[in-house]
Amino acid sequence: MKISKRTSKQKLQPASFLNPHSTLGELDLYLIGEGRHERLWEVLGAHIQYDSNLEPLGTSFAVWAPNATEVSLICEANYWDKNTHKMVRVGSSGIWEIFIADIRAGQKYKFAIHQMDGRWVDHADPLAQHTEIPPLTASVVYETEFNWQDELWMENRKSFQAWKSPVSIYEVHLGSWRLGLNYRDLARELIEYLRFQGFTHIEFLPVMEHPYGPSWGYQVTSFFAPTSRFGSPDEFRYLINELHKAQIGVILDWVPAHFPKDEWALARFDGSALYEHEDPRLGEHPDWGTLIFNFGRNEVRNFLVASALYWLEEFHIDGLRVDAVASMLYLDYSRKEGEWLPNKDGGRENLEAVQLLKEATSTAYRTHPGIMMIAEESTAWSGVSRVTESGGLGFGFKWNMGWMHDTLSYLERDAIHRVHHHNEITFSILYAWSENYVLPISHDEVVHGKGALVNKFPGDRWQQLATLRALYGYMWAHPGKKLLFMGSEFAQSEEWNESRGLQWHLTQFEEHIGIQKAVQLLNSKYRSIPALWVKDTAPDGFTWLVGGDSANNILAFARWDESGAPLVCVTNFSPVPHERYSMPLPISGAWEECVNTDNVAFGGSGICNEVITASSASANIVQIKVPPLATIWLQLKRN
């Protein structure tokens, strides 16, 4: 009897009646046809088979290619000869399979597919779990031998409630955080830095294998394989394991919105538009020159849902951030009249994509309690972060692109002109609880000619740095989880370029060290003050104290925890300091600063407050010092 090491602790599926070494049983074929096989990676692709003594027998291969007239397994062992190992079609499933003795882990392979037009085209395995290092394109037989040591993290995660917990995310492009590092190097250097800065989570730009490096991983060709640029899949597991041991959660960008046209990958896989649509009005992205998945096809939907589950299950990922959701939801996305086809009801909504997203989110949450599903969705689509049972898309969170655009638009203006645009900085509160939000200052804001974040702001160098610190203080106190792209935490001076890496040499200078220290303090205080996160998704967790002082570019608000303890945030987006600014505090008592981004240690001017006493006799109106271009946080003084 054949045994797979990876499934030896699980109930084995019955072998196919066609092949005693098959990974496919009748139940598998049924579930695949229905689009409901939640562990697709265990039955398609390449799988080493073992005898009862766990001695390797060879490798089984299976691939879905229903319109192929022939399929062959080509590999190093047969010198890439398509005539040596002809695969067998499994009934009417559209799946082809073969078992080849003596093939072990590390063997490079592809599927040679004979198309209806008579051509043979060599394709990488869609379910490959390992690949050659690009620009090479073969799949690699692989079997994990990794022993996880994050049991405590995984057990605690089951009860994690992200919406009422501190979530501060550091967004990273693996290849350019520091040039030349592999997964194991990153497990040492990146984790040490994350612990120093105090982020709770890290989010990786897509790690799934992709042929073109400057796409940053957003044009995926292998939806089940981490990129080989930095090591093996088990070395990537090691990085995640070490992050969990350091109490840092891991979020991956996942890109079901499109895939590239490379002939060796998914495009026209069996000679037909198998994964994509035949009609370019449905099947191609005009902006990106890529293809769009046929979300309405059972097997394609299954492929994508299984991909999401794969990363959560096999790599212990704590969350997936789904890229470009708006491009999936709208049939007319970035298209002119006549360039798109309406849905069956005559509308512009992509109903099949909606169904795919609902299935992916609901299945992920059902099978992996405590994870996060996060949408980058830039429109006013209703219910992105509402449960599917009530008509929502089922995500846990949505990126608050409106907050990001309005905030940066406001801060890019000279302070004297901000008086006329005060609504840009306050408007986000009007819809802050319409979704569960993440506040993103992401890679998209520091590329494509947008420049470095700190250079967006007007004024001299001191004012630019002060504005950046004030922004972070305001952002960390605003309702919503936090996300900051790498380099922004030390005020990188140049636009991000993946080929050059971050400007780490700047961190020897005081002005950049000051920004790092400010972010470090904000993360530390944020994690320790429940008022800043425990009622993030509840309107009664927020109270305006000063919302309309456009003349002074000042705003102030209180955040509340479940016991009624407040945190007050006061932000001055003007370079004018105030020695006696009059404003209310939410309750009586002695108040003290716990954060002041004007601190001299951060590069500020050092204007700070001693203890501030609010009295009910004066309606809790106090006179406070408000430093220029700064944010201060006030807490009730402990006895």
Image (cartoon, rainbow, N blue to C red):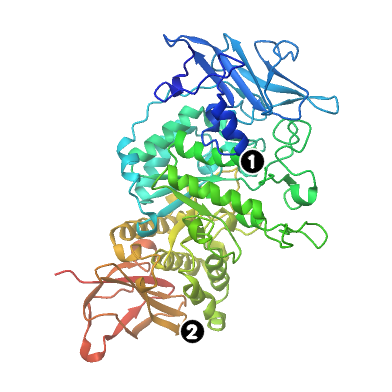
Amino acid type, label 1 = Asn
Residue 120 lies, with reference to residue 590, above or below; the image says above
Label 1 and label 2: CA atoms lie apart by: 54 Å
Seen from the viewer's position, the closer of residues 535 and 456 is 535
Percent across and percent down for residue 519 are 39, 58
Estimate how packed mark 1 is, as few (under 14), some (14 to 19) or many (20 or more) residues with alpha carbons within 10 Å: some
**Secondary structure category for the residue under label 2:** loop
Percent across and percent down for residue 30 are 59, 32
Residue at the spot 76% in from the left edge and 26% down from the top edge: 68
Q: Which mark is residue 298?
A: 1
Estimate how packed mark 2 is, as few (under 14), some (14 to 19) or many (20 or more) residues with alpha carbons within 10 Å: some
Mark 1 or 2, which is nearer the eye? Answer: 1
Q: Which mark is residue 615?
A: none
Residue at the spot 65% in from the left edge and 26% down from the top edge: 63
Image quarter of residue 215: top right
Seen from the viewer's position, the closer of residues 426 and 39 is 39
Residue 490 lies, with reference to residue 417, above or below; the image says above
**Residue 491 in view (yes/no):** no
Marks 1 and 2 in Cβ contact (< 8 Å): no
Residue lying furthest left: 639
Residue at the spot 56% in from the left edge and 53% down from the top edge: 443
Amino acid type, label 2 = Ser
Task: Name the residue carrying label 2.
Answer: 550
Residue at the spot 24% in from the left edge and 68% down from the top edge: 563
Horizontal arrangement in the rendering, residue 198 relative to residue 97 (left or right): left
Percent across and percent down for residue 158 are 35, 45
Horizontal arrangement in the rendering, residue 201 relative to residue 85 (left or right): left
Chain-order first, disc 1 or disc 2 = 1
Seen from the viewer's position, the closer of residues 98 and 638 is 98
Image quarter of residue 535: bottom left
User: The C terminus lies in which quarter of the figure?
Assistant: bottom left
